[in-house]
Image (spheres, grey):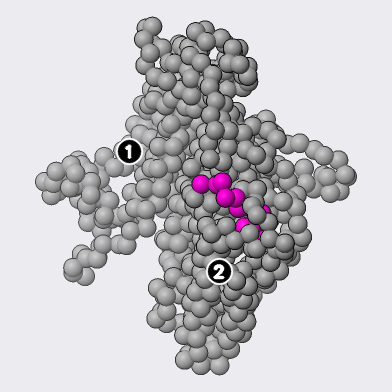
Amino acid sequence: MIGPFAHDALLIALPILMLGIVLAPVAVRTGRREWIPVVYSTLYTNFLLVSTATVAMIVALVTHDFSVSYVAQVGSRATPLFYTVISLWGALEGSILFWAWVLALYGSVVVWLNRNRPGNLIPYTALALLAVSLFFGILLVGPANPFHPVFPIPADGPGPNPLLQNHILMGVHPPLLYLGYVGMTVPFAFAVGAMLSGEVTGDDWIKLSHRWTLLSWGFLSAAIVAGMWWSYEVLGWGGYWAWDPVENASFLPWLTATAYLHSMVLQERRGMLRLWNVNLVVGTFVLTVLGTFLTRSGIISSVHAFTVGVIGYYFLAFIALVLIGALVMVAGNSDRLRTSGRMDSAASRETVFLLNNLFLTAFMFTVLIGTLFPLIAEAIRGVKVSVGAPFFNRMTLPMVVMLLFLMGVGPALPWRSATAAEMRSKLLPPLVGAFLFCVGALVAGARNFYGVVAFTFVGYAAVANLREYWIGLRARRNAHGEGWATALYRLIRGNQRRYGGYLAHLGLLIAALGIAGSSSFRREREMTMKPGDTLTVAGQTIRLKGVWGREEVQRSVIGATVEVLKNGRVVGVIEPRMNYYPTSDQPVPTPQVRSTIGGDLYLTLMSFDPNGAHATIRAIVQPLVSWIWFGGGVIVLGALIGMLPARRRPDSSLSEPDVVPVRGAVVAETAP
């Protein structure tokens, strides 16, 4: 009974969504403001109905109700409860249901928080959210229906994809990805609302979308890092980013959202880039839908991708409708979208922001072309073409190092223009960091040109961003006599957007340092070992102790016990293994990693003798890998700080920035 009940809830949601879509423009055009709460209620009702269907699916999975098609596809009585629950997003139909639920949640919260706002921006924003929700509702009752009845009812199911139940990170990465992907619908809806209401000339929609964009960007950043970690811990190849098409699909909207977070500041402060910002928001949303299409249409081969189906045509049609609709709305608002501000000087923060947008957009188009070219070539010429990591690395590394450099220059330059003296005082001190990091990389053995340049620019940008904290801290201590911790807290609370942004920069620099270090200094060896044999790689010595096997609830396991030696003493034990699942013909390699602050010792069991006489072990030593995961955490922390509400001042006379002198310089503590 769960299946029909949940399916009926999704069916009921469709006419309710349609009612809201029709009622929103009618209420605005006719001036019947009393109907607008009804429009908002359709979003709340949709959330309740989709939540009902989602909870019903979880109950069906947990109770092993194999009369429901999705449970029969991914369920199994042998699967542990945790992996049973997270199999909700383990295949096509369940992932669409989860997507629709997250979208309904976002839509409800957005209109609830802004329900009393005057004007027509929010009603039209609700209209956009309703339209996107309707599309996913149609998928759920049509080609992606997870509640089809199954007869005869099977006694058991195959369980989730083995790769999806092989590591706990699959309970983390997909929800973060959906929260980031779906969250990009909110700034898109605000942009649509601004264009339909004619309120695009003001900055209200930019200000409203800022926190939602930052929230979604933070989730997407965390999802990308968690996905890299999952790839590193599960797939057994010793890497974390392979330029896989689905990896790229998550990276593309991150690039455009990053550009938007920078360019929206120019619109708020200088009235610049209005048209560009609208295009970035629309482009980011389209890229999230494109990424969903690539993952769920079955047109690409990937460890992340789902099966082939007609659902891809629905996504293509939706992308086309969004693009056509956006072009029409932009054309209708062309006069309102004209830029009112202008550049005062090339030596200014505005110039850095423009260059930042240029390189991020070029980066996005490079990755997009490399991802789609094989698909286009096969569709037109019928020839399979491969675009792999060498292409992406060669094309994107120059842009990466330039972006690292701009992260150092941007915080240092003032708005409008800078004098020669200001440029010297701001841009020269970080050269110390660039020199130290460059020399350190060369001494450590880095010889790749881009690797050394990346280390150099990371050093420059790190000092430049940390210096902004130091200037502010010194100013507060001199002016107020505060302790270091108090000064830091009040500095950040005085302008959380600015200092949260600097912290996010530092997180990106830490992650970049981890990527550069692990790529430049990676060493590996592979050896067939008997118990008692030793292997040394990059100064790390391991000894095979033995090979073992055991049965677990949902799988069989073969593993090797490997001791880590230092000066002849055992300082650690690592157990790489192979997991065998009943539904898979091939074992799933499960490497094990011994992490330290300096680097990782990464072991993979490549093969073994059934009698335990020997095993082939691949040992990889990669410095600084854990810095990538730590940097990702710092990025998310910076995003969270940037989302904090502005501190309310008790008196209007304090609305201007606090300006304090520091050795002849003037520091505005709260100026963004």
Spot occupied by residue 352 in the image (x, y as percentages of width and height): 48, 46
Spot occupied by residue 151 in the image (x, y as percentages of width and height): 72, 63
Q: Nearer the viewer, mark 1 or mark 2?
A: 2
| Residue labelled with disc 1 | 466
Looking at this view, is 337 or 260 the one in front? 260
Q: Is residue 511 magenta?
A: no
Q: Is residue 430 visible?
A: yes
Is 100 left, or right, of 456 in this rendering? Answer: right
Is 74 left, or right, of 670 in this rendering? Answer: right
Residue at position x 56%, y 93% in the image: 30
Query: Could you tell me which quadrant the C terminus lies in?
Result: bottom left
Residue at position x 44%, y 70% in the image: 109
Spot occupied by residue 230 in the image (x, y as percentages of width and height): 53, 39
**Rounded to the nearest whole Å, what is the CA distance between mark 1 and mark 2?**
49 Å
Q: Which residues are magenta?
A: 69-80
**Label 1 or label 2, whichever comes before in sequence order:** 2
Q: Residue furthest left?
A: 481
Please tell me whether mark 2 sits on a helix, a strand or a loop: helix
User: Quadrant location of residue 17?
Assistant: bottom right
Looking at this view, is 352 or 446 the one in front? 446
Q: What number is the disc on residue 53? A: 2
Three-letter amino acid code at the position of disc 2? Ala
Residue 220 vs 117, above or below: the answer is above
